[in-house]
Amino acid sequence: MTTDLWQEEIQRTIAESVRVASSLREMAPKLSQAATIMADSLRSGGRLFALGNGGSAAQAQHVAAELVGRLEADRQPIPAIALTTDTSILTAVGNDYGFEEIFARQLRALARRGDVVLAISTSGNSPNVLRALEAAREMSLKSVGLAGRTGGEMGKRADLCLCVGSDSTPRVQEAHLLISHLLCSLVETACLGERPRGGENLPERS
């Protein structure tokens, strides 16, 4: 009986994940716009700062890793920094100024005009993410948000907010991974110019 129930749950979850991922097709114009915002900054000498909490923190680090390392092509590293990794800064700022300031204060210290912020929050309402977007606007930084459903408050504060049509945190985070890979791929292509197709002249990935 338990096995039957698990099979039912597995099929339901996969079907819902596929539905949410498929709905991103309708977001293609916004995805292209987001990639353009990021690529324009990076090709002009700017840097990308990624941030989020929990699973979204892992997503921010994933994006930075794909750009500093590589996604598909052998190329020069693309400057991207996840503001979620320095535990001394996070705990010092959280202790002295409050958890809401952990990303905003880092942006004020490190970012400059021409940089771009990638802010990730499944609810779109994480206070520290919203404070970072406020700081970005005050500093004239471009910003792209990844959120769920309506985008929450993030939709009002990011220059462009990509909202995944689901109220389920796991489904939103799965879609954010797909979006992240798409954005990194488009940015990589833009920073390289026309990328060789089919892996020509590229070393094998390990």
Image: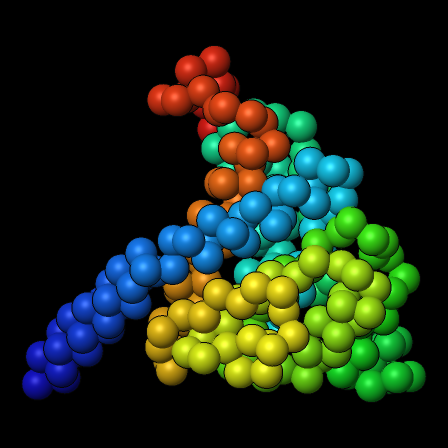
The residue closer to the viewer here, 103 or 130, is: 130
Reply above or below: 173 against 36. Answer: below
Residue 200: percent from left, percent from top = 42, 15
101 versus 75 height, above or below = below
Residue 170 image position (x, y, % from top left): 40, 74
Q: Residue at x 58, y 27 (%)?
A: 192
Q: Say whether residue 205 is left or right of residue 128.
A: left
Q: State which quarter of the image contains the N terminus.
A: bottom left
Left or right of 159, for residue 133 = right
| Any part of residue 56 in sight | no
| Quarter location, residue 107 | bottom right
Which residue appears at 86% of the width and 77% of the height?
Answer: 93
For the rendered model, the colour scheme is rainbow
Query: Is 144 on the left or on the right of 167, as rendered?
Result: right
Q: Residue furthest top?
A: 201
Report which quarter residue 8 is drawn in.
bottom left
Residue at figure coordinates x 50%, y 77% from the top left: 151
Q: Does residue 30 appear to the left or right of 82 in the view shown?
A: left
Asked whether residue 105 is in view, the answer is yes
Total residue callouts: 0
Q: In the image, what residue occupies the spot 49% across and 19% down? A: 203
Residue 83 screen position, x and y as percent: 74, 62
Q: Measured from the top left, where is residue 86 in percent x and y? A: 79, 63
Q: Nearer the viewer, residue 88 or 31?
A: 31
